[in-house]
Image: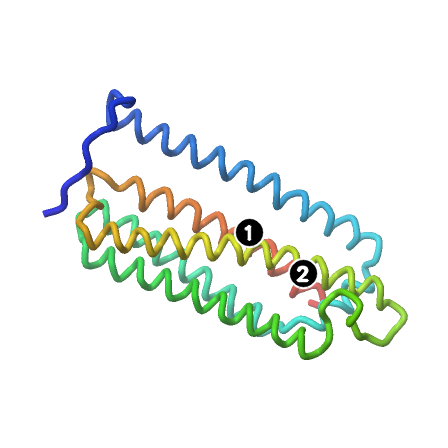
Amino acid sequence: MSRAPSLPSHFSTVEQRSVANHLGLWTFLATEILFFGGLFVCYTVYRIAYPAAFVAGSHHLNFWIGTINTGVLLTSSLFMALADRAVKRDRRTALRWCLLATWLLGAVFLGLKFYEYGEKYHEHLIPGPNFQLNGPWKPQIELFIFLYFTMTGLHAVHMIGGLTALAWLLWQNHRGRLSPEHPAPVEMVGLYWHFVDCVWVFLYPLLYLIIR
């Protein structure tokens, strides 16, 4: 039998705690939006300045890995939403499998992303002194690749944070600490996971779909 933890002394009601949880997380996500927003603005400025070079740079990305990863991440969001539904219906077994599926799909995403990074390394397309590329737009394409690594790398760091939070949820569910009376951890991690997925939904067309 799952048992909700006692209400902390600084909260008067469960509803007050829920409002505080959501306010805190949305404030955190707002700062993350500002952080990623700066990178998107930087990308937009250089994309307008060097449109042809950015199109050429996009040719050096693995379109199919980016596309598969998009499907993987969107599917993971589906399982995260099902996990939220499961905890509110007190279905601990379903919750465990949904959280595990979300975690595994997130791990697949990172595995494919690091594989793509490896491709860039072997092609000598890592920005810096060893960047090797022939053509008139070499500096501009190197800038595009730099933005690619910066934006997707930051996104990957957030993914690792999300996987850590999902592992913690699995442990909390194993110990019976998640229930319809205490679904807040699943809700909070779910909101964060959906945010990270939304960021990728913007990164995918900006980086991979320029040529289309």
Rendered residue at 27%/49% (across/down): 85
Label 1, secondary structure: give it. helix
Q: Quadrant of residue 116?
A: bottom right
Q: In this image, 115 relative to 19: left or right?
A: right
Q: Outermost residue toward the right?
A: 136
Identify residue for label 1.
Answer: 199
Q: Give neighbour class at mark 1: few <14, some 14-19, many 20+ (Cα, 10 Å).
A: some
Q: Position of residue 55 (x, y in %)?
A: 76, 65
Query: Closer to the camera, 21 or 52?
Result: 21
**Dot placed on the residue nearer the N-terminal end, 2 or 1:** 2
Q: Position of residue 162 (x, y in %)?
A: 43, 53
The C terminus appears in which quarter of the rendering? bottom right
Choose mark 2 or mark 1, whichever is in front: 2
18 is higher (above) or lower (below) than 164: above
Decide: marks 2, 1 in contact (CB < 8 A)?
A: no
Rendered residue at 51%/64% (across/down): 70
Query: Closer to the camera, 30 or 44?
Result: 30
Q: Position of residue 128 (x, y in %)?
A: 77, 65
Label 2, secondary structure: give it. helix
Query: Closer to the camera, 18 or 174?
Result: 174
Q: In this image, 136 relative to 187: left or right?
A: right
Q: Outermost residue toward the left?
A: 1
Identify residue for label 2.
Answer: 148
The three-letter code of the residue at mark 2 reads Tyr
Colour convention: rainbow
The three-letter code of the residue at mark 1 reads Val
Question: Gap in Å between the C-alphas at discs 2 and 1?
Answer: 13 Å
